[in-house]
Image (cartoon, grey):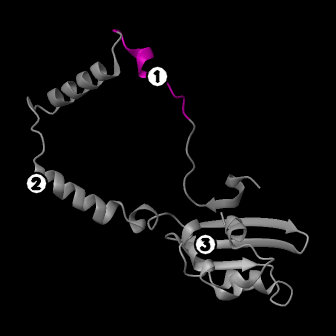
């Protein structure tokens, strides 16, 4: 399966647009540095600001605090993502797995799988632990690696299983 087939959501799809290089549209050839300075000066003219003051150390520290406290958090980066469904199927000698997970705000809220507890108890138990977890590879890997039952099984590779979930 390719990645785009695994994830479905109700978001608006991007419209493909032609991409161009600014250099092709300039009358006078400029370096990137010259272009950046000219662009910046023109923005200042439009905003009617003759000079832009550099930020103070106090302002820089506050910006850094806000960035680390809010914008670098998992909740900000992933927690506001739209609802989506992840689907995957795998065929192995002892396993024919069809999996569908509903993810909301980055959290796995529901899992549907054709796993029989008697036939494949390890897969059943692993999937059972995922409801309420973040749909994030290393979070799920850590969660499953902590499980004593799964880690004792020689035929069950936790890392390989985690790759099926993305």
* Mark 2 to mark 1 CA distance (whole Å): 38 Å
Measuring 73% from the left and 52% from the top, which residue is drawn there? 2
* Res 136 seen here: no
Q: Which mark is residue 58?
A: 2
Number of the label disc, if any, that sits on residue 78: none
Q: Helix, strand or loop at disc 2?
A: helix
Residue 147 image point, x, y percent: 63, 85
Residue extending farthest to the right is 93
Q: Residue at x 12, y 39 (%)?
A: 54
SS class, disc 1? loop
Q: Which circle's residue, 1 or 3, is located before the other in the chain?
A: 1
Closest to the observer, 136 or 113:
136
Q: Name the magenta segment's main secondary structure.
A: loop
| Disc 1 to disc 3, C-alpha distance | 42 Å
Tell me where the magenta segment starts and ends, as one range.
17-28
Mark 1 touches mark 3? (CB < 8 Å): no
Other-residue count near label 1 (Cα within 10 Å), few / some / many at <14 / 14–19 / ≥20: few
Comes first in the chain, label 2 or label 1? 1
**Which tag is nearer the camera, tag 1 or tag 3?**
3
Q: How far is mark 2 from mark 3, CA to CA?
A: 40 Å
Question: Eyeballing the image, is 116 above or below 13?
Answer: below
Specify the label residue 21 is tagged with.
1
Residue 24 shows in the view: yes
Q: Mark 3 highlights which residue?
A: 141
């Amino acid at each position: 399966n390719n990645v785009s087939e695994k994830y479905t959501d109700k978001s608006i799809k991007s419209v493909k647009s032609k991409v161009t290089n600014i250099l092709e549209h300039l009358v006078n050839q400029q370096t990137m540095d010259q272009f950046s300075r000219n662009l910046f000066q023109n923005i200042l003219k439009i905003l009617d600001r003759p000079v832009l003051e550099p930020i103070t150390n106090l302002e820089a520290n506050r910006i850094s605090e806000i960035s680390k406290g809010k914008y670098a958090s998992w909740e900000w980066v992933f927690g506001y993502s739209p609802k989506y469904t992840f689907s995957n199927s795998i065929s192995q000698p002892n396993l024919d797995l069809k999996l569908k997970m509903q993810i909301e705000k980055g959290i796995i809220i529901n899992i549907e799988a054709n796993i029989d507890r008697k036939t494949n108890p390890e897969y059943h138990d692993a999937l059972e632990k995922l409801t309420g977890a973040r749909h994030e590879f290393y979070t799920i890997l850590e969660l499953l690696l902590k499980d004593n039952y799964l880690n004792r099984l020689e035929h069950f590779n936790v890392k390989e299983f985690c790759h099926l979930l993305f």
